[in-house]
Image (tube, rainbow, N blue to C red):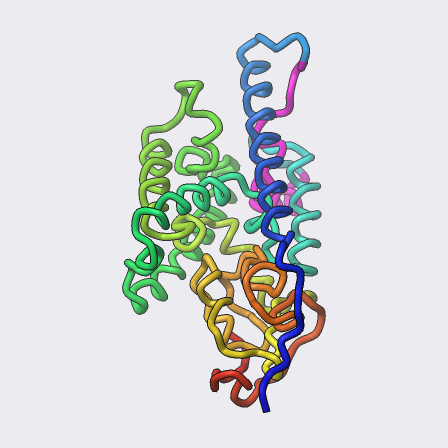
């Protein structure tokens, strides 16, 4: 028996929609950062007025403020109430769809991805394969160490301890000349590594990505591979920026999934309704119709 390949629209729209969303949020965050910094320096752009600070639109600031908010009723220094509200919204989205903030919204993730486009042109198929598999697997848990360290230090000091190290913060404030050297080095290293490894900061060091990744274990809408119609072409594996073996899954539960949807039938998979975002899950499956890949959760 062979899989029936249903014809699908050759003009797959999901990648373009996602790219538009990424550009929108990059421009939005840049706008907020510029107007907010100008306001702090006592000057504004007449047509724009005073903007919010960069901390006001960062949900991770809200996450690391939860403990202090619950125990003392106050927020970590520099964190705004809006960051807590955004953290709660992001939390709800994560429960539903996983780390969509990482895959669709985060400007630093987008910049790494755009740098990766250049790396892919330079190295072709070798791009995103330079790190040995075993080393890569071990390095991916570093970001949980960063999350624990940042959370602990923030609780102990009541300050945004990660600000000076954060390449995201540096990316949007480097023009002010008030960035920490370690942050500048972190940003340069992140951008350079992006030429060899897709989303290196996301994979190995981002504390908010680590927090978001936990929700992949029980999210309501997950990335699912239908083993009945799968032809085992591995297109989903090749498309995944996080190197997840989607073709070996029933429902992807990997903590590194960023819900970018690059692997789905609307973006990469040539068979309609075979890799898709849906509620529920596929159980562990037998050999795929097209080539013998085993299903299961990754």
Q: Is residue 246 above or below residue 130?
A: below
* Residue 270 image point, x, y percent: 57, 68
Side of 176 relative to 260 (left or right): left
> Who's the residue at 67% across and 15% down the image?
48
* Residue 213 visible: no
Residue 64 drawn in magenta: yes
* Residue 51 image point, x, y percent: 64, 20
Residue 294 drawn in magenta: no
Side of 282 relative to 231 (left or right): right
> Who's the residue at 42% across and 37% down the image?
167
Q: Nearer the viewer, residue 161 or 121?
A: 121
* Residue 83 image point, x, y percent: 64, 38
- The quadrant where residue 176 appears: top left
> Who's the residue at 63% across and 61% down the image?
266
* Residue 204 image point, x, y percent: 39, 54
Region in magenta: 48-73
Q: Main secondary structure of the magenta part?
A: helix
Q: Nearer the viewer, residue 173 or 250?
A: 250
Q: Is residue 71 above or below residue 238?
A: above
Q: Nearer the viewer, residue 208 or 289?
A: 289
Q: Is residue 144 above or below residue 19?
A: below
Side of 227 relative to 115 (left or right): right
């Amino acid at each position: 028996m062979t899989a029936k390949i249903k014809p699908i629209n050759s003009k797959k729209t999901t990648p373009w929609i996602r790219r538009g969303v990424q550009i929108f949020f990059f421009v939005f965050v840049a706008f907020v950062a510029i107007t907010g910094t100008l306001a702090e320096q006592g000057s504004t752009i007449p047509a724009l007025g005073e903007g919010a600070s960069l901390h006001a639109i960062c949900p991770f600031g809200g996450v690391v403020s939860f403990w202090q908010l619950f125990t003392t009723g106050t927020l970590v220094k520099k964190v705004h109430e809006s960051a807590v509200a955004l953290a709660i919204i992001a939390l709800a989205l994560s429960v539903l769809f996983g780390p969509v903030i990482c895959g669709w919204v985060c400007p630093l993730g987008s910049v790494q991805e755009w740098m990766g486009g250049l790396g892919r042109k330079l190295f072709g198929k070798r791009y995103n394969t330079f790190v040995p598999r075993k080393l890569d697997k071990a390095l991916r848990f570093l970001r949980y160490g960063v999350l624990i360290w940042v959370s602990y230090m923030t609780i102990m000091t009541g300050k945004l301890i990660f600000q000076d190290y954060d390449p995201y913060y540096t990316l949007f404030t480097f023009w002010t000349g008030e960035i920490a050297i370690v942050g500048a080095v972190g940003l340069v290293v992140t951008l350079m590594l992006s030429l060899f490894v897709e989303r290196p900061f996301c994979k190995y060091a981002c504390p908010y990505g680590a927090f978001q990744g936990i929700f992949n274990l029980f999210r309501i809408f997950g990335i699912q591979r239908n083993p009945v119609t799968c032809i085992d072409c591995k297109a989903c594996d090749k498309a995944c920026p996080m190197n997840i073996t989607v073709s070996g899954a029933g429902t992807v539960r990997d903590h590194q999934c960023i819900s970018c949807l690059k692997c789905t039938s609307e973006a990469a998979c040539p068979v309609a309704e075979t890799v898709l975002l849906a509620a529920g899950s596929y159980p562990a499956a037998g050999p795929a119709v097209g080539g013998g890949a085993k299903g299961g959760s990754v």
